[in-house]
Image: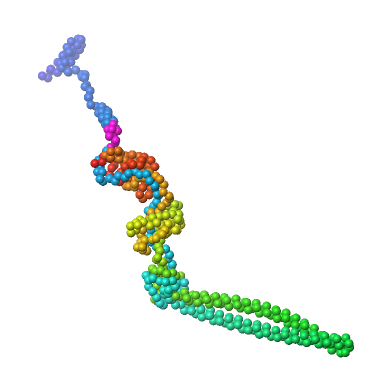
Amino acid sequence: MSESPLTSTQGTAGSNGSGGASSAPSASHGEGVDRKIEKKTFTPKRIAMLVGALALVGLIGYGVWTSATGGQSLNVDREKLTVSTVEQGPFQEFIAVTGNVLPERTVFLDAVEGGRVEEMYIREGAMVEEGQPILRLSNNDLRLQMLNSEASLAEQQSRMQQLKLSMEQQSLSLQQQIAQMEYEIQRLERQHSRQERLYEKDLIAEQDYLDTRDQLNYQQRRLRLTRAAFVQDSLSQQSRLAQMENTTQRLQSSYDAMQEAISNLTVEAPISGQLTALNAEVGQIISSGTRLGQVDKIDSYKIRAQIDEFYIERVRRGQTATTQPLGGREYALTVSRVYPEVENGRFEVDLRFQSEQPESIRRGQSIRIRLELGSPEEATLLSRGGFYQSTGGNWAYVLTEGGEAAVRQPVRLGRQNPNYFEVLGGLQPGDQVVTSSYETFGDADRLVLE
């Protein structure tokens, strides 16, 4: 058995050398060097091409299916949806704000003069009448200043009285002197007239005539000087008196101011109303300018509201607003004041009732208000809802004619108020729109209502 392989090999070689007559049997038994390799049917490349073709067919089939059925559908319970009808009507742009009720008029109590609280006549919360004492302070320094001022005034008044008396006496003396001079002049004029006639007839001596004439001239000059001195002295005395009167008036004003300061130690109600705050106790030292409390006029009220600074350019004095029902009734308001200061992104406005105000209204009460930002305009309206948070107002689910489904549809919304959106495109009056939240609908293009 060990030689048969060798013999077979040689036989094969011989056969090859003589023309290959014996090669056929070797080939038939598969014992040659070359042999045929068979190819595989499912290669990786063919598998990848087959998967791609199936995916393409699936996408085409899905596209055909969605086109025929209106897109991806989702079954929802109609009872859990809010459906609103698009309407045509007046659109009033307004904002909802919250205001606090305040008295229409509030007057603060400030300590004009400092001092020690000696007595309190009424307590916080009491009703007061204008001018009614509330508390009394004491201030020894003010009282001492008032006494000094009073003494200075009295001294000045006494000086002025003495000056007036001196002026009257001096005036009387000068008037007496003038009267005496006038009498002497009259007497000398008569005597000179007689002597002149006698002198012309040489009946009296020349010296006597000349003496009488000289005395007359002297008295006349003396009278003129005395009158001039009287006028000058009168003007001087009047000027001095005027200065003293000015000084007296200043001292009187100072004294009056001190009296007013003393009277301010008694704090009185500036208006009739309710003493809603009083921060003082007997024995407490109060500094000048300290706020002691306030008095509110409670027969009329106003509402102060805070508004986002985004609307500061659109809120003006005279705009109207409406309260939410109070006791089953709405009340009209008017913006009476807009405060320009902005704090923490908000500014304040005051609103007053146009006519009557609610009877049950109280200070500090919070009231919801609709503040109108413009005049009503005719527009297509859609009720507000949670859908806006999901769509941004770019699309909505609109019910089909039969109402059995809602289809996603592009829309365009404009202005808004707390109740409505202004529809600018994509919807018509009468369309029914799902306005509740879309958070659970995913990417559905069609809602099947059950």
Residue 58 included in the magenta stretch of the image: no
Place of residue 449 in the rendered image (x, y in percent of width and height, measured from the top left): 26, 41
Q: Nearer the viewer, residue 23 or 203?
A: 203
Q: Position of residue 348 (x, y in %)?
A: 42, 58
- Name the dominant secondary structure of the magenta segment: helix
**Residue 83: percent from the left, percent from the top?**
30, 44
Image vertical order of residue 346 relative to residue 422, above or below:
below
Q: Is residue 199 left or right of residue 27?
A: right
Is 314 rendered above or below residue 228? above
Left of 240 or right of it: where is 150?
left
- The answer to whether residue 396 is above or below residue 352 is above
Residue that protrudes farthest toward the right in the picture = 202
Q: How many dots with numbers?
A: 0
In the foreground, 261 or 431 = 431
- Could one spot residue 429 in this view of the protein? yes
Q: Is 288 on the left-hand or right-hand side of 394?
A: right
Looking at the rendering, in which quadrant would you find the N terminus? Answer: top left
**In the depicted view, which residue is nearer to us: 342 or 294?**
294
Residue at 82 percent across and 85 percent down: it is 193
Q: Is residue 67 magenta?
A: yes
Residue placed furthest toward the left: 1
Residue drawn at x 40%, y 56% is: 332
Residue drawn at x 42%, y 63% as measured from the top left: 104
Residue 337 placement (x, y as % from top left): 45, 58
Which segment did they paint magenta?
Answer: 64-72
Q: Residue at x 14, y 18 (%)?
A: 5
The quadrant in which residue 424 appears is top left
Image quarter (top left, top right, bottom left or bottom right) of the C terminus: top left
Question: For residue 249, which quarter of the picture?
Answer: bottom right
